[in-house]
Image (cartoon, rainbow, N blue to C red):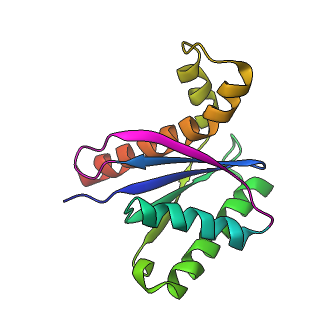
Amino acid sequence: MGIRYLGVDLGTRRIGLAISEPNTGVVSPLSVINTRDSLDDNASAILQVAEEYGAGGIVIGLPLNMDGTEGPQARLSKQLAEAIRKACQVRAETSAMAVHLHDERLTSHAADRRLLDHDLTRKKKKARQDAVAAQVLLESFLSCRARAAD
């Protein structure tokens, strides 16, 4: 049986979430949550969703620059990953949950393209974009894992 992953697209105002199906690898956009005041609060909110959906792993987007260097948002993603790992140690039921960072370059652009054909208002597209970006991120992560296993 496969592992269910929760994909996380960390933004400055919103956090997009997506979930994978453990046996099929199908990834669906899940929801968007507003960012909290602290990394620990964001970590707790993400962990709560992961537990609710029975995720065995969390994949956080790592927004690298096009030249592969890290900017401030990439450092923030790394700090969030560490906050989630620490929160897992506190909670006995999630102590074994793996937290991964995955290159998310161009996921927002891919999400925009996926939403182009949908008849949504600008406001609804913006709200949905973060969850779809998390979906693209998680699909990329699972694809890379599958290629590595071959």
Residue at coordinates 59% horizontally, 15% vertically from top-left? 116
- Residue 39 figure quarter: bottom right
Q: Where is residue 31 in the image (x, y as percent from the top left)?
A: 55, 44
Residue at coordinates 63% horizontally, 28% vertically from top-left? 109
Q: Position of residue 53 (x, y in %)?
A: 40, 58
Near-viewer residue (81 or 106) = 81
Above or below residue 44? Residue 20 is above
- Residue 83 figure quarter: bottom right
Residue 98 lies within the magenta run = no
Residue at coordinates 55% horizontally, 15% vertically from top-left? 118
**The residue stretch that appears in magenta:** 21-37
Above or below residue 80? Residue 16 is above
- Residue 134 figure quarter: top right
Asked if one can make out residue 106 in the rendered structure from this viewpoint, the answer is no
Above or below residue 18? Residue 74 is below
Residue at coordinates 53% horizontally, 67% vertically from top-left? 47
Residue 32 lies within the magenta run = yes
Asked if one can make out residue 67 in the rendered structure from this viewpoint, the answer is yes
Above or below residue 135? Residue 145 is below
Q: Position of residue 108 (x, y in %)?
A: 63, 34
